[in-house]
Image (spheres, helix red, strand yellow):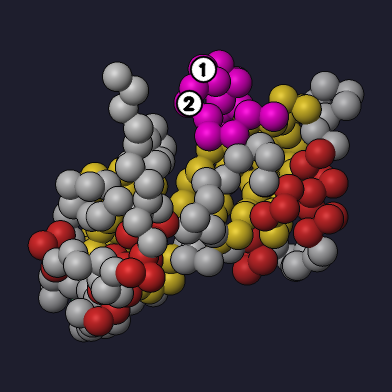
């Protein structure tokens, strides 16, 4: 007997929160939620948006991502009290002492607020400033052996770092930024459509800061995008 997959539900036929009580996962811990168990049989991107909208109604914020291994079935959600740019004092009590829990999450030891740290986009830190995406796409296309790993997001875009090689075999460090898209994972097919910034720097500039040899030695499965 052939078991057919049930077709996905149309979210327009469901309430805005998809009928899910998202507050169950709002205590600030990270939760992995499964389609058909924790949320209905919809595209996981709809579940992510429903979760983020539910957080806003609760006066909170939520960061959500698809699971890397099972992007069609699993999402990760983590709630916080607010989102602030990295390096800013606590929005609630002004404390400058903030405990970073992991890359995007922090906690204020004075008032116990939980916060999401929005990272700076490359436009904010690159003196070259913004440019047409074709320029950045061309910059990446000119490289070979490109290995990129997702390092965070700004709330609007995803940040990737890694290494590559130029025509003459010189190793370079690559920083790249792509538009965030709830419905579609970043892939080698869509990355040139979604690129918003790319910076390519000679690896020798990072001597003592980044161990490029160690990056090159990592297995391909450690990387999110390999070109
Ligand atoms: Zn505080």
Percent of width and height locating residue 145: 72, 25
Most foreground residue, 2 or 100: 2
User: What residue lies at 66% left-to-right and 37% top-to-bottom?
Assistant: 188
In the figure, 178 relative to 68: above or below? below
User: What residue lies at 20% left-to-right and 79% top-to-bottom?
Assistant: 58
Percent of width and height locating residue 35: 27, 47
> Where is mark 2, residue-wise?
222
Confirm whether the magenta stretch covers residue 223: yes
Which residues, given as a range, are shown in magenta?
208-227
Most foreground residue, 40 or 222: 40
Q: Which mark is residue 130?
A: none
Residue 148 location, quadrant:
top right
Residue 97 location, quadrant:
bottom left
Question: Given contact means CB atoms under 8 Å apart, are the residues at marks 1 and 2 in contact?
Answer: yes
The residue carrying pointer 1 sits among few (fewer than 14), some (14 to 19) or many (20 or more) residues within 10 Å by Cα, namely few
Looking at the image, residue 162 sits to the left or right of residue 133; the answer is left
In this view, the residue farthest toward the right is 168
Residue 54 location, quadrant:
bottom left
> Where is mark 1, residue-wise?
219
Q: For the residue with label 2, is its CB less than 8 Å from the closest atom of ligand 1?
A: no
Looking at the image, residue 178 sits to the left or right of residue 90; the answer is right
Q: For the C terminus, give its image quadrant.
A: top right
User: What residue lies at 48% left-to-right and 46% top-to-bottom?
Assistant: 151
Confirm whether the magenta stretch covers residue 82: no
Q: Secondary structure at mark 2?
A: helix
Q: Secondary structure at mark 1?
A: loop
The answer to whether residue 173 of the structure is visible from this angle is yes
In this view, the residue farthest toward the front is 1
The residue carrying pointer 2 sits among few (fewer than 14), some (14 to 19) or many (20 or more) residues within 10 Å by Cα, namely few
């Amino acid at each position: 007997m052939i078991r057919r997959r049930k077709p996905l539900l149309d979210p327009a036929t469901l309430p805005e929160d998809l009928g899910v009580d998202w507050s169950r996962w709002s205590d600030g811990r990270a939760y992995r939620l499964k389609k058909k168990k924790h949320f209905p049989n919809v595209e996981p991107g709809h579940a992510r948006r429903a979760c983020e909208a539910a957080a806003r109604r609760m006066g909170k914020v939520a960061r959500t991502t698809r699971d890397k291994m099972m992007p069609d079935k699993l999402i990760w959600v983590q709630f916080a009290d607010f989102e602030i740019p990295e390096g800013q004092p606590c929005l609630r009590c002004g404390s400058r002492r903030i405990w970073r829990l992991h890359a995007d999450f922090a906690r204020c030891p004075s008032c116990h607020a939980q916060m999401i740290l929005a990272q700076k986009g490359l436009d904010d830190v690159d003196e070259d400033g913004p440019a047409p995406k074709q320029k950045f796409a061309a910059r990446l296309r000119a490289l070979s052996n490109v290995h990129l790993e997702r390092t965070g997001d700004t709330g609007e875009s995803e940040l990737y770092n890694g290494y590559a090689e130029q025509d003459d075999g010189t190793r370079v460090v690559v920083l790249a930024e792509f538009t965030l898209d709830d419905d579609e994972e970043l892939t080698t097919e869509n990355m040139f459509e979604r690129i918003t910034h790319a910076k390519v720097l000679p690896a020798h500039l990072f001597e003592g800061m980044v161990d490029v040899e160690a990056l090159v030695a990592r297995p391909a499965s450690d990387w999110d995008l390999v070109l």
